[in-house]
Amino acid sequence: MTLTKADLVQQVYKNHEGLTKAQATASVEAFLRLSKDSLIDGSDLLLSGFGKFNVKDKNSRRGRNPQTGQELTLDARRVVTFKPSGILREKINK
Amino acid sequence: MNKSELIEALAQDIAVPHREAAAITNTVIDTMTEALARGESIEIRGFGSFVIKNYGSYEGRNPKTGKKIKVSPKKLPFFKVGKDLREQVNKNR
């Protein structure tokens, strides 16, 4: 089973009686957009109890195409990493 | 940005009281946590996906003392950033 955005909307709709389905959808969309905007701005996103999304700058480096063995230069780039919180790790392993 | 800042931004964005935005945020985070706790994966288009990886037990070392220790089997969540987010984060470099 895979949890999707539709499942999140459904759960928000179910848990919050004051919201219409459209409002539940809008709130999940806004939650995701605001989270993304923070990372796109280059600032980390810390969701206590869940984990931390970090934005990291990587230097350019020499790499290889694993299929052909050909050397190439990988450009400097900015990536997103995730570190699960201790609470999340515990719940997953319970 | 931390969770309370996200809640504040959400409250403004969808024009609901702070308390309501906090409750919605908790529902979203709890729903994702529970899915992962059941061993399920999460896939959110444009944002990213989470999968649980299983590790068997192995013999490790305490890096401080060098002493051998047995590491019990464990599960860990892995996040893979979605295409849209990956591209936008990199574009703003």
Image (cartoon, coloured by chain):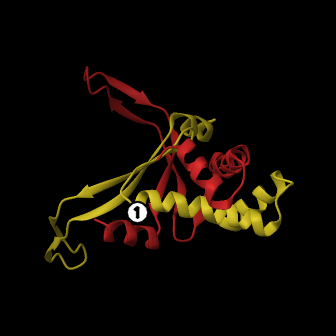
Judge left or right: residue A45 versus residue A71: right
Judge left or right: residue A70 versus residue A37: left
**Quadrant housing residue A80:** bottom left
- The residue at 44%/68% (across/down) is B85
Picture coordinates of residue B84 (x, y %)?
A: 45, 73
The colour with which the image depicts chain B is red
| Quarter of the image where the C terminus of chain A is located | top right
The disc numbered 1 marks a residue on which chain? Answer: A
Number of marks drawn: 1
- The residue at 47%/68% (across/down) is B82
**Quadrant housing residue B80:** bottom left
B14 vs B79, nearest the viewer? B14
Picture coordinates of residue A77 (x, y %)?
A: 26, 65
**Quadrant housing residue B51:** bottom right
- The residue at 15%/77% (across/down) is A70
Any part of residue A37 in sight: yes
Judge left or right: residue A82 versus residue A5: left
Q: Is residue A30 above or below residue B24?
A: below
| Quarter of the image where the N terminus of chain A is located | bottom right
Picture coordinates of residue B56 (x, y %)?
A: 48, 42
Which residue carries the number 1 mark? A40
Query: Which of the chains is yellow?
Result: A
Q: Is residue B35 above or below residue B68?
A: below
